[in-house]
Amino acid sequence: MIERYSLPEMAALWGERHKVDTWTEIEALVLEGWEAEGVAPPGAGAAVRAAPPVDLDAWRAREAEVHHDLAAFVDVLADAMPGHGRWLHYGLTSSDVLDTALGVTLKEASGLLRERVIALFEAVRRLATTHRNTPMVGRSHGIWAEPTTFGHKMAGFAFELVRANHRLGEAAHTVAYGTISGPVGNHSTVPPAVEAHVLGTLGLRTEPAATQVVARDRHAAFLSTLAGIGASVERLAVEIRHLARSEVGEVAERFAPGQKGSSAMPHKRNPILSENVSGLARLLRGYAVAGLEDVALWHERDMSHSSVERVALPDACLILDFMLARMTRVMEGLAVDEARMLANLEASRGLVFSQAALNALIRSGMERDEAYRIVQEAAARTAEGGTGLRMELAADERTSAAADSLDRAFDLDTHLAHAGHGVDHLAKVTAEWLRTGASS
């Protein structure tokens, strides 16, 4: 991923230094396992740890000669282990190290991503709580629907992030696997006891029936989960973008001192951070497809997945990491214009209470279709410049029996009496609760 969309901690996890150091740790653990089996001489594992960190330039130079990154690593590290170098990588195939290291990195990356999800959840929850009773227009199809609250709207996004956190926990479990099982996965050259030592120490689970690799349906599921979380973050970003439109003007992204919204139009304050998130979500969906394409490898393994994963897995983690951090910044600095929300609500001239008026007429004894037609006709007159839905209905003698009920139907406080219900449920959700893997 380009530097523009890479945050340091996640980028370091996918960097060459971390990769080679993880390979080194796996090789050391394997030799410790062989020592316990009485095969490798005492001190072989310690010799790996005592060796200086593999020089990345020397490793790259060796790879240019042998055209195999793992083999080049083994050569360089073995040269730094006099007396023990011949035991390095004993009984292993490249994928034993590569896939186990990948499991370690994906486990670590998942931990970072879960913390990002939790941070975004907390930012959205704060908005939901603060604006529990802030009235605004609810919209469906982009058209005025009924009154709601900004808090209720934010509560919906918050609980979607709770579900995202749960799915990410499951996906992290799915890919926290490794294999130290030899060329075709049947332990012909390395016993299960060595594998158990390595994976147990690393906190990974054992692929129960490996081929030469850990099964790629795991990684496809992981990428699909990341894409799904990206879609949820994008939904939030799209909501902010719509509410920030000039004609709506109910929210705005934070505008830093000295910031310019347009090179040509000084008045512009564009929702560029949310737009950026929408664009990055498209990349994530593409990587999910790439992961699915990698599942069907030939027999015990082919190489077709390798080039895909060198791009898709790190980039997907980096993209989602960046998206979550960026959207958290948006929500923490979001300007909410309560007065504009109320003004937009009042601009409907009562149209947003049409269902409440319909129900009031039904309760008065009117048949539903007749009541619907009366409200619909009054709404049309209101939209064409009439006096407002309540007044239009009052002018219709057929509604006189429901006058008191209609007055209550147009009362905003009555309409929103239960709107805080979803927000109140958020009080049960804490960051620690999310970290334990609880779901909603």
Image (cartoon, helix red, strand yellow):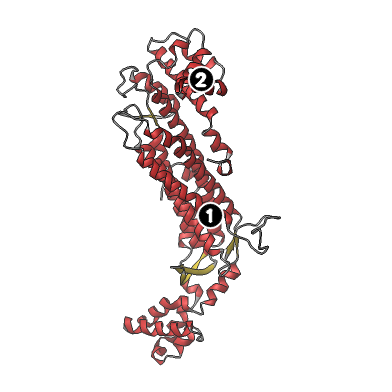
Q: On screen, 38 above or below 278?
A: above
Q: Residue furthest front?
A: 65
Q: Residues within 10 Å of mark 1 (few under 14, many from 20)?
A: many
Q: CA distance from mark 1 to mark 2?
A: 50 Å
Q: Amino acid at mark 2?
A: Arg
User: Compared with residue 308, is residue 322 higher up or lower down, i.e. above or below?
Assistant: below
Q: Quadrant of residue 42?
A: top left
Q: Which mark is residue 317?
A: none
The residue that mark 2 highlights is 62
Q: Residue at x 66, y 58 (%)?
A: 263
Dot 2 lies on which element? helix
- Specify few, some or many for label 2: CA neighbours under 10 Å numbering under 14, 14-19, or 20 or more: some
Residue 294 image position (x, y, % from top left)? 36, 38
Q: Secondary structure at mark 1?
A: helix
Residue denoted by label 1 = 124
Residue 127 in the figure: left or right of residue 296? right
- On the question of residue 171 being in view, the answer is yes
Residue shown at 60%/60% (left/top)? 270
List x then y, in percent, for residue 351. 47, 78
Q: Is residue 59 above or below residue 284?
A: above
> For this rendering, which residue is in front, 367 or 183?
183
Residue 141 at what x, y percent from top left?
Answer: 43, 68
> Mark 1 or mark 2, which has the lower sequence index?
2
Question: Where is residue 172 drawn, in percent x and y?
Answer: 42, 38
Q: Residue furthest right?
A: 258
1 or 2: mark nearer the eye: 2
Contact, mark 1 vs mark 2 (Cβ under 8 Å): no
* Residue pictured at 60% horizontal, 70% vertical: 339
